[in-house]
Amino acid sequence: MLPPFEAVILDLDGLILDTESTYWRAWQDAAGQLGFDLQAGLLRQLSGQSIDQVARILTSHFGGRFDFGQFHRLSSRLWHEWVTTHGIEILPGYDSLMEVLRRLEIPYLLATNSQCAYAENCLRLAGIADHFPQIVSRDDVGQGKPAPDIYLRAAETLSLPPRLCLAIEDSHPGILSASRAGAVPIWIPGPCRMPKAVNPPFQARFDRLDELATAIEHSLTTNRP
């Protein structure tokens, strides 16, 4: 059973869209071209992080000879080439969740650690750009996830206290951000899963978005007069 809520805040990468696998591909290819071996264990540390955190992690790992600016430009070009050719897949259960949110008239918005231009481009490539008229992105706040800023801004945009917002996340930084903001963290592990040792502070866990949709419908139809 879900706790009481009045709105839903959705992450993007790894939750709605299978973008993280495309980032991993581009990051590994770019690192390889620059002479660095970016292995899966390090890639998992980047899951859900904002670009400034990605820069910090990679620079710390590879040392002074790693030029993050050059890496970022190259990986961005490789990523754009890949997704322009192959598109971006929507993850299972998305349509069911959106149908329930709209039918039950539940307010929702997107809250992403990505920069707004990247988020909008990903939504366009996936064919769902018109689904999210409200987006809170890394551009809108002082600090990205795992800081609470993005969820605090999202709740403010919805004109609700964070405790009445379900925060749907697939990553450890996202779950921490939601928890620190006082929102209700709901974990749906994405394609790029957390290390087994990580135990995020979530209040409910589902395997797919359609399972969450069923829980939302059951919770609201049971509790509404």
Image: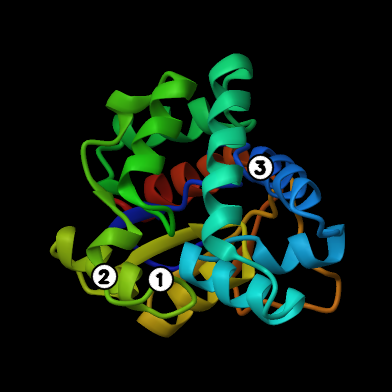
* Closest to the observer, 158 or 213: 158
Q: Given the image, on which type of amino acid does mark 3 rest?
A: Arg
Callout 1 amino acid = Gly
Note whether 84 is above or below 76 in the view shown. above
From the image, tell me which residue sits under label 2: 141
Distance (Cα) linking label 3 and label 1: 25 Å
Q: Earlier in the sequence, mark 3 or mark 1?
A: 1
In front: label 3 or label 2: 2
Disc 2 residue type?
Val
Q: Which residue is the site of mark 1?
A: 144
Q: Are marks 2 and 1 in contact (CB under 8 Å)?
A: yes
Give the camera-side residue of 191 and 56. 56
Residue 171 in picture, x, y percent from top left: 62, 63
When asked about the image quadrant of residue 173, the answer is bottom right
Name the side, left or right, on which 175 lies relative to 164.
right
The residue lying furthest to the front in this view is: 65
Q: Quadrant of residue 22?
A: top right
Q: Are marks 3 and 2 in contact (CB under 8 Å)?
A: no
Residue 11: mark in rendering? none
Q: Residue at x 53, y 73 (%)?
A: 53
Picture coordinates of residue 79 (x, y %)? Answer: 59, 35
- Which secondary structure, mark 2? loop
Q: Position of residue 174 (x, y in %)?
A: 52, 67
Question: Relative to residue 60, is residue 99 drawn left or right?
Answer: left
All told, the count of numbered labels is 3
Task: Report which residue position mark 3 lands on.
Answer: 208
Q: Is residue 129 left or right of residue 122?
A: left
Q: Residue at x 81, y 59 (%)?
A: 36
How was this image coloured?
rainbow
Q: Please indicate, yes or no, whether residue 57 appears anywhere in the rendered image.
A: yes
Q: At 53% across and 78% down in the image, what residue appears?
A: 176
